[in-house]
Each structure stands twice: as structure tokens, then as C-alpha cells.
Image (spheres, rainbow, N blue to C red):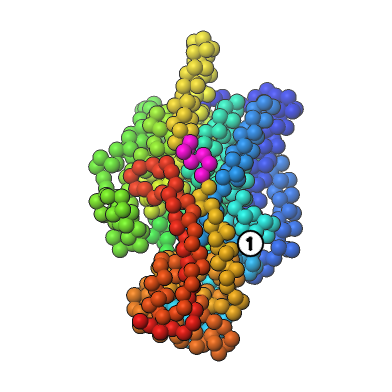
Amino acid sequence: MSRSPLVADDDLPTTTLERGAGHWLQTIVLGAATWVVAMSLLAVVLAGLGAWFPWLVLPLAAVVAAGCGWWARGIPARSLPVWTAALLAAVSIGAGIWTAATHSEQVLPRRDSASYLQTAISMAETHRRVVPVDAASAGGPEVLGIEGITLSSPAFYEVGSDEEPSVQPQFVIGPGAIWSLGVWLGGPSGAMLLPALASAIGILAMGLLTARFGAPRWSPVAAAGVALLFPVLHTARSTYSEPLATITLAGGLLALSVAARRSARGEIGRAALLAGVLIGGTAFVRIDGLRESILLIPVAGLALAQGQRWMRATLLGAAVSTALAGLAALWLSNQYLGTIAASLLPLVGLGVLMGLAAAALLWWQRRGGGVPQRISRVLPNALGVAVVLLGLFLASRPLWQTVRQSPDDPGSRVVAGLQLRQGLTVDGGRTYAEQTVTWLSWWVGVPGLVIALAALAWAVRTATVCWTQGEPLPSWTGPLLVGAGSTVLTLWRPGITPDHPWAERRLVIVLPFVVLLCVAAAAYAVRHLSRRAPVAVAIAAGVALVAATLVPTAMATWPHRSERVELGELAAVEGICRQLDERDVVVAVDSRAANEWPQVVRGQCGRAALSTTSALRKDPVALADAVTTLATALEERGGRVVLLAADSPAALESLGVTVRPALDTTVLEDDRLLERRPDHLVTLPLRVWLGTGPVSAR
């Protein structure tokens, strides 16, 4: 029986040059991943205390990078043939160049990427994470106390009192901190290029993971397959958190496989600790990194049951980094945590249950418990079949399930509007979560999913054989179980508004996992068949397996190959900024203005900005009174109210102010579809009207 469903796990016989090539590539990945976590932790301290200054942070970033590189350099690496390492590097660099050349310009916070960008700009300019606002600059505490007048806007919360208000960004601190370095180095445009660099390193990490899965010579193919995935490309073109999370998570899984491999030789070192730090530290850049952290628990249980003490260091690293990330979120992102508590608490509960189950099984084992022989004989095949059945169960959900959430949820109203425009039955409570496997098939094809499921089942079977025979688990077992568990949890509950291609962000872990399984299956097929059939037949089988995934992937991405989403938006925003005076206080008076412009004006334009609530906007008399009170208070302080509308000039005209058009342009954005894969961009008009002068409600 073959020991691995992928390839033999032993290091290749290599020259010094080949060892060096693999070592340098691994050092880049692990060093970059460690740097992301370290800089995020540094940002918690400095930005939390108001000391996120470029003259301090940029030199520290260089010092931290050197230290992280030194630490990563000491971790044993898998050797790679020189041509393989060169090709893997070329694929990663090429993907980064492609992504940078087609990067988006999402500046208005209509999506999370622009929210991260505005957070980065705010941190770069104010040197803080939570930004205090001078109440006098907005007309005084009495103005902020008016019902319906607020500093809040989507992704930015008003906290504190009317006398001492502050604005707290949504999400966790990592992405804003990292992208803020780009703001210092090249303005908003500089920040927009950093995700391409991060994605290139993440793609390199995927290639190295494939090598650790036992297919080193196939690693460039896996990297190319991941680079071709449109959801990966889509998130890397904008300032999302996913490119950073890919680096930390893939780096952590890579270190985990290194630790497992080296432990078999009695070498328990820094790789084990680093694996936990990176996987747990993913929560610094995405709070749902908690999911992968808790999935380390069953992996640890299996390793500890075999007496593999290195796993204690991994658990320690994961526990410390996850705890630090959680404390940082409670301090600097507590409003955000409150809004997603319904998603986080089940994860925490699942982690507790996993921990108790693992502890109970280890206690039982120490007391002499074990798996009966009759069960051991059938367990490998049973678990392999169970994997297939679970995959079929998830794929069949549309046949017997329609997943819904509360119709009062804000996302439900968005979905209802999309359904109405697309001619679908209006049922805003639908989350479409039962169709997640269909979402996967859009980007890798049905054959690719079948191949990946078969490879996963065979891998689980092989690992179980090792377990039941008392042999050390293959070093790829940890990454395999974490990837599989994350995939199942994501497919069961994606937890995102189901408009595409935006919803595909949830698949940025799942889809690369599918590609890696398919490439590993091809490598195994070639190796297995070459022992029993002509080499040409073996190679043809491997090529067919890879093509079954990569060809549909490339075809799905082809329509999006050169898209520049919302190109021109940065210039449009800068044009609005130039029309505002230092003494202006901008008030968003219609729905679109309130959604898109307050933080842009406050952070990017450097002008005071207020927003209005939906309830106030629906009451013209109350709105006019509020604006009049604000204008009077500002005039006493030498300021001026500027009203901003982005839906139409109607809201300004109803207030009787002098209206002038300030922006009228069109950009292109991704379509928002619910039941099919998007294949083109649609127009997005950007219009702004500014209103000044005395208010006289009509």
C-alpha cells in the first residue's frame, strides 16, 4: 500500500543549490507571515496609544522584517529542484505583476476593501486606530446631541460621549495597519498595490504547501492554478484582508507540516511554535481566523495521542496569538465584535467542545483505552466513505434545503432588492448558503470538485491507516485536516451577503484547497501509473487530471483578466476634496451620501463630516431644523455647513439651499448577481451635489 495519497514524504536527494533554493523561498513566506503578525501586534500598541507615526513605524517595520527573516531562516526547508524553484518564483512574481497592473480603485466604502483603505488612510494621517473628534469642529456637543445627527457611517462607528466623541473603524486592526504603510510610501495608490505583493507571497506559499504535500515538482502547477482562481485575483486587486490572511494561514500550515516532519527525526524546534503563532495570529487580520485556530485542536489531539510532544509548542503559540488578537479586538474593535457575536459565539462553543472531547480521549487513552481491533480494520475505509458522503451531502443541499435568515436583517433588505431587479422571487431572508458547492463549481468546474473529493477521501483513508497501525501520521495530516474542516464550515455557513462575485471572498481558502488536492492527485497518479504502465500513459493521466481543474478555472477567469474595478474613483474623490474649504463641515443628507462619503471626507479630505440617520432623512422638517441648528452653531465658530447629496439633488432642493453639481462621472464595477457567475462589469454612476447657504425647508 502506498504510504501517501500524494507522494512519498521524504526529502529529495539534492545538491546544495537545490537545498538553498527551497530554503530561500520558504524563508520569504514564513518571514513575511511572521512580519504580518508582528506588525499587527505592534499596531495594537502604537496605534492604540496614538503613536502610529511614519518616522517611528517605518524603521521599526524594517527591523521587524529583518528579525522575522532571521527567525524563519532557521527553520528546515524542503529541497526543490532549481528549475522547480525558479518556475515557482516566476509564477508568483508574474501573478503579482498581473494583479498590480489590473488593481482596483475602490475608494468609497461601499465594500469592505474601501473600508480597509479608509481605515489605513485614517491611521496614516491621525496616527491612531480610534480617532478622537473635536466636538467644537462639528458645532459642539449640543449639535452631536441632536437626534439623527451622527459621526457614524458604514464601517465606522461613533463611540464615546457627545463631549468627547471618537470614530472607531470596523474590522480588526491588521489590514488597516499594513495598508497604512503603503499610504505613507505612495499615498492611496501605494496602498492599493500592496495586496498584489501580499497575494504573490500567498501564491508562493500555496506552491510550497504542495511540495510539502509530497508533490514538489508539481508546485509551480499548483501555484499557477491558485493564481488563476478569480476569487483570489479579485480580492488581491483591492485592499481586502484576504491576501494577508492567505499569507499567515498558508505560512502557518507550511510551518505545521515542517514541524510534523522534523519531529519524526527528534528535531522539535521553532517550526512548531511558529505554526501556532501564525495560524492563531491570522485573527489579527481576519477575526474568522478563529475558525482555523480551533481546528488545530483535533490535530493536536491526534498528535499528542501518538506522543508527539512538538504539538504542545504549536498549541501554546496558537493560544497566545489568538488570545492577543482577541484582546486587541475587544479593545480597538469592540463595536464590530458586537455586531458579529452571533457568528463568533458558535465558533467559540465549537472550540470548547473540541477541546473537551480531545482532553477526554487523551485521558481515556492514558488509562489504557484504545480502538478495538475489529473497528481498526474497517475504520480507514469507513472514514474515506464518510468523506465522500459528506461531500455529496453538501452538494445536494439545493435539492432539499433553502437556508434563510431573519427578514429584518439589513442584509435581507439588500438581497430583496437584488432579487427584485433580477426578476427572482422576492425572499430577502434567503442566504443561498445551500448553493455554496455550486459557487465552487463556477470557478473550478464539476470535474475538479470530483477529483478533489476523491483525493481528500483517499488522503483521510491513508492517514487513518497510519493511525490504526500505530505509525506516525504523515506530515501533511495537520494542514489537510485544517483545510478540510475550514472548507466544511465555510460551505455550511458562508456568513456573507450572497451577491457575486463579492460573496466569493468566503471561498479564498476553500478554492485553493481544491486546487492543491487536484494537483496532488495528478502527481500521485503519475507516480502510481508509471510503475504499472508506460510513462506516456502516466503523464497523460496526470495532465488530464490537472487540465480538468485548470482549464475550467482559466475559462472562468478569462472574462475578468484585465478588469479595473471602479477605476477613476480615486480621482473623483480627490476632485471633491479640492472643492472643500478648511472651515467646511460636510453633512450627508441622503441615503447614498450617508453610506459612502462621511469617512472619505473626514479621513481622505481632512474635513469635518457628519451624517444623518434614516429616520431623520425621512422627516424633512426635523432635518431642516437640525441643519439650521448646526449652521448657527458653526457660524458662531467661524465654520460653514456644506450639505452633500449623492442620490439626486432633491434632498438639497427640499432644504432650499443653493445647489451646485460637484461630481458627475461613471466608473465600472462588478455586477451583483445571486444565481449565476458574473462575467462582466457594469456601470456605476458617481454624482455629488453640494448645497450651501441658509436653509428654508419646502
**516 over 539 or under it: above or below:** below
Q: Look at 41% across and 70% down and name the residue there.
A: 649
**460 over 293 or under it: above or below:** above
Query: Which amino acid is tagged 1?
Result: Ala
**Along the line of sight, which residue is nearer the eye, 262 or 95?**
95
Q: Look at 61% across and 34% down and name the residue there.
A: 91
Q: Look at 74% across and 28% down and name the residue there.
A: 17
In terms of secondary structure, where does tag 1 sit? helix
Residue 334 visible: no
| Residue 562 inside the magenta-drawn segment | yes
Quadrant occupied by the C terminus? bottom left
**517 over 406 or under it: above or below:** above
Q: Residues within 10 Å of mark 1 (few under 14, many from 20)?
A: many
**Along the line of sight, which residue is nearer the eye, 311 or 161?**
161
User: Where are the magenta residues, as a range?
Assistant: 557-563
Q: Look at 60% across and 71% down and name the residue there.
A: 606
Report x, y in % for residue 250. 56, 42
> Is residue 53 shown left or right of residue 286?
right
Report x, y in % for residue 677. 39, 42
The residue pinned by badge 1 equals 43
Q: In which image quadrant can residue 652 be found?
A: bottom left
| Residue 318 inside the magenta-drawn segment | no
**Along the line of sight, which residue is nearer the eye, 376 or 22?**
22
